[in-house]
Amino acid sequence: MNPHITKALASLQNAHYAGYFDEMDKIVPVELRTPYSQHKGMFTANSYPFNFYQKLEVFAKDVDKALSVVPPVAEAYDKGNVPPVTNNITINQQGGKIGQLNTNSQVDNRGANFNL
């Protein structure tokens, strides 16, 4: 479990809602910001339901699940399995080559041809 989730749940168990939100602020992913903002708004307005504790606990566990999903590209990148990407840009039909762009190294624009 994510350490911030662990701390947030510990704060929740001690009825320290501010501590819960302090920890969750650090890690809630973009796709879960809307429901998170609603929960935080209820707390700030002091207008939350009787089962607020349970809702926050379930939400924290949902965030933990969302954080544990690693996109395949990110996982490959972390393992160093990403090949260098090379793009050649042509500026006209005659095939004028501006240069070669290597995203994993320096740009080499020596000998660029411009046929306009």
Image (cartoon, rainbow, N blue to C red):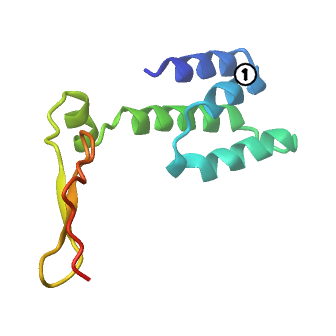
- Assess disc 1: are there few (<14), some (14-19) or many (≥20) residues with their C-alpha within 10 Å of its C-alpha: some
* Left or right of residue 76, residue 30 in this image: right
Q: Amino acid at mark 1?
A: Gly
Residue 107 lies left or right of residue 67; in this view the side is: left
Rendered residue at 70%/50% (across/down): 38
Closest to the observer, 3 or 77:
77
Tell me: residue 56, above or below residue 96.
Answer: above
Residue 11 appears at what percent x and percent y? 68, 18
With 98 as the anchor, is 19 left or right in this view?
Answer: right
- Name the residue: 18% across, 49% down: 85
Residue, disc 1: 19
Name the spot of residue 116 as percent of width and height, x first. 26, 83
Q: Quadrant of residue 1?
A: top left
Closer to us: 82 or 54? 82
Q: Position of residue 88 (x, y in %)?
A: 17, 62
* In the foreground, 107 or 37: 107
Residue 49, percent from left and from top: 76, 43
Which residue sits at x=55%, y=32%? 27
Give the residue displayed 79% in from the left and 45% down from the top: 42
